[in-house]
Image (cartoon, rainbow, N blue to C red):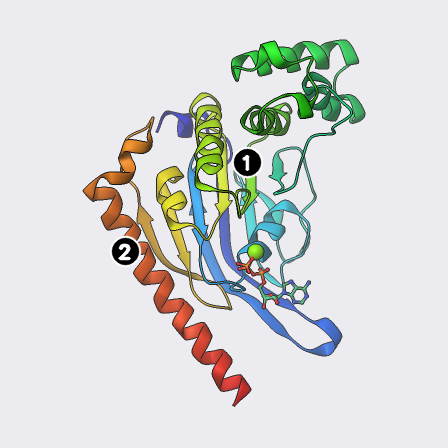
Amino acid sequence: MPSSLLGKGAISIRNVTKIYDPEGVNVMAVDDCSLEIAAGEVCMIVGPSGCGKTTLLNAIAGFHSVTTGEIYLDGEMLCGPEKPLAEQGADRIVVFQHGALFPWKTLVENVAYGPIVQGILSKKEAHEKAEGMLTEAGIGDMSQKYPGEVSSGMARRAEIVRALINDPKVLLLDEPYRAMDALTKSIMHEALLEVYDRTKVTIFFITHDLEEAIFLGDRVVVMTTRPAKTKKILDVNIPRPRDYQVLSSEEFRLLVNEAKDAVHEEAVKAFEAGERELA
Ligand SMILES: Nc1ncnc2c1ncn2[C@@H]1O[C@H](COP(=O)(O)OP(=O)(O)OP(=O)(O)O)[C@@H](O)[C@H]1O
Ligand SMILES: [Mg+2]
């Protein structure tokens, strides 16, 4: 993978455990979870509902502390025993499901906003950079339009450009395309892959949609039922750039089935555990 030569955005999750303690009731969300993600990898995370996926993302982003274990970014410790809560930083950008653009700002103003408020670039520099990046993303001619004046595909593309303007090492996405219809989703995937093929930023992407996981991912990590640890890792050796014809290939179907079996096995365990608790 050429991007790994850049050595940017490698994540190392080592023996991470997270126990929440709401009102003295311990909830172990993640248990001794380890995972190595290469620089420039698209790593898809799947697993039963409530297993601890978001908890892991929040630990990487610095939204929540870890109880034990360490997380490293390019060899630098983000969090660990001395510092259980990672500092939030522009090197790890979270793309929220409803991380919508400011409707009262044009696309270029939206993209330029971050570096201006953080004092990283002057207004002029930020606008120039934003214009350049929007052009690279194929929507340069829309830069002066407001989000409401462009298609949803263009708006989403602008959102990704906005996430990338500070040249992050990692994009963290938590079910960003949940509840979208299949066609809109495919437009989102196209936009994300286009950006990825150009930037090779490391992507940590949580989803429940196994087809989405295989279509986008270099690897798909299936988590166990709560508390989360890695159950199975599937390598997706389908060459990039990928297009939608991949979906009907034998290789793709086999991978989806393998992921489905693994997730199903864990979902059944979660269900049975729930039944036991109720009994
Ligand atoms: N702030 C919190 N305080 C207490 N418990 C929490 C907190 N956040 C999450 N949990 C619990 O930790 C477990 C894992 O939650 P998490 O949100 O990480 O799961 P998830 O895999 O992202 O689920 P989903 O697929 O439904 O989004 C759940 O049992 C949840 O109820
Ligand atoms: Mg979640």
> Mark 1 = which residue?
170
Amino acid, disc 1: Val
Rendered residue at 56%/50% (across/down): 71
Residue under the image location 75 percent in, 75 percent down: 23
Q: Residues within 10 Å of mark 2 (few under 14, many from 20)?
A: some
Give the quarter the ligand 1 occupies. bottom right
Q: In the rendered structure, which amino acid carries the disc numbered 2? A: Glu
x, y percent for residue 274:
50, 79
Give the spatial CA distance, label 1 vs label 2. Answer: 27 Å
Residue 60 to residue 142: above or below: below
State whether residue 15 appears in this view.
Answer: yes
| Screen quadrant of the N terminus | top left
- Element type where label 1 sits in the image: strand
Q: In this view of the protein, which residue sits in the foreground, 126 or 145?
A: 145
Would you name the residue on which mark 2 appears? 258
**Residue 151 placed where, x, y %?**
58, 24
Total marks drawn? 2
